[in-house]
Image (cartoon, grey):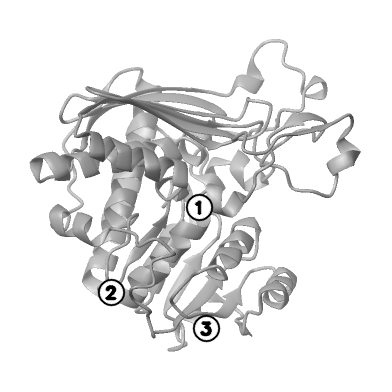
Amino acid sequence: MAEHGCGSRDPISILAENRVRPQGDRGLVMSKTVRVGMVGAGFAASFHLAAYRRVAEIPVELAGITSRTASKAVALAREFGVQRIYPDLSSMLVDPDIDLVDLCVPVHLHHRMAIQAARAGKDVVCEKPLLGFAGEGRTGDTSRTEMFDVVQAELEELGEAFRSSGRKLLYAENWVYAPAFRRTADLAEASRGKILEIRGGESHGGSASEFSKRWETSGGGALLRLGIHPISAAIHLKQREGILREGRPHRVRSVWAQTADLTRVSGFDPSETRLVSGWVDVENWAIGVLTFDDNSVAVIGGSDVSLGGANSWMELCMTNARLRCNLHPNDTCVSYAPDAQVFEKVFLNEKLETKAGWNSPSVDHEWEAGYVQEIQDFVASVAEGREPLSGLELALESIRTAYGLYMSAEEGRRIDL
């Protein structure tokens, strides 16, 4: 398959700009107020808004919110002190007081809304995955080759919209900012060794969102929704390594994958399990292999058939070191309860089927997951006029890689990118 170029900025300058200053560093206090417009009023919007309230050094104003569900917008505005409620995105975009638009909406809306905001002169935070094949009412029966071509065209259109407008795409890939991952990345760099193999995955018992069960609203299943985290993190590590060692980022050269809906195996009975079922046309299990242009590899996984709460991890095998990061859960704090009612009203960790028995309560979930650091970097990049650690180029290669994996799973062969 011929490679479709998405273009890129000078990687050395991107790396130099992408040093996230620790929150405790008070060497520079910014005076520019960054005014944020939130699009969406669901779960992602709530934790993004919470993270904006924890931004240090830079004044942030939660200037407005819009949602197709007005009652949710009103509730969030009241909870977080958002100044205005807009009837729709267009009315938000014409407001000159809005600097940064944060898209916390279903995946099938990302492409159109991100381009619309960029052309309106706004910087854009976009939740992961950046975009996915929606097909305008068509289902997951569409060939993955056709999906790849459609997605590639959309990526090129989106990339051009941001480059020509001079606006920033701030890609909300929280793994890149999670403290455990950042420490791992820094140790890998400090070792001066070569990354030979990366393994990583995210799993839990399934999403409760109905959007996640249909290709036309999610753009894919476990591979895109969960696997995109280790995909993006692995790409980030190899881009960074390539720049530091050779002056250019390493790129994904080829991919191989397998996907499945494991709730369709013989004998599966949804009444006998707490796993989420009812998947319409997307996979709930996936594994993939990425081969980079230096011949190193990454093995990634995404699964909705794993009980016991969310599990996110990554391991690096290097020429002179071995590193493993557990994003969550961690055993900094542990709990035991003989029945679920003991901690009924307490958040312990994501995707737990029960709060009974032993668990690992998060001590600060937003910080551990990287949401706080992510939003800090995004706001700083807007205020300082620099690129974010997770931006346009990482988003473009991550989605292109994911859809290459879908092609591979359908065709049963390695796909050269």
Whether residue 246 is visible here, answered yes or no, is: yes
Q: Position of residue 281 (x, y in %)?
A: 57, 33
Residue placed at 51% from the left, 81% from the top? 92
Q: Position of residue 372 (x, y in %)?
A: 51, 59
Q: Residue furthest bottom?
A: 96
According to the image, label 3 marks what residue?
91
Q: Which numbered disc, 3 or 1, marks the residue that appears first in the sequence?
A: 3
Q: Position of residue 82 (x, y in %)?
A: 63, 79
Secondary structure under tag 2 reads loop
Q: Are marks 3 and 1 in contact (CB under 8 Å)?
A: no
In the figure, is residue 177 to the left or right of 82?
left
Q: Which numbered disc, 2 or 1, marks the residue that appears first in the sequence?
A: 1
Residue placed at 70% from the left, 32% from the top? 276
Residue placed at 68% from the left, 28% from the top? 308
Report how far apart the C-alphas of labels 3 and 2 lie in the structure.
25 Å
* Placement of the C terminus among the 4 image quadrants: top left
In the figure, is residue 249 to the left or right of 40?
left
Q: Are marks 2 and 1 in contact (CB under 8 Å)?
A: no
In the figure, is residue 294 to the left or right of 233?
left
Tell me if residue 380 comes above or below residue 331 in the rendering. below
Q: Residues within 10 Å of mark 1 (few under 14, many from 20)?
A: many
Q: Residues within 10 Å of mark 2 (few under 14, many from 20)?
A: few
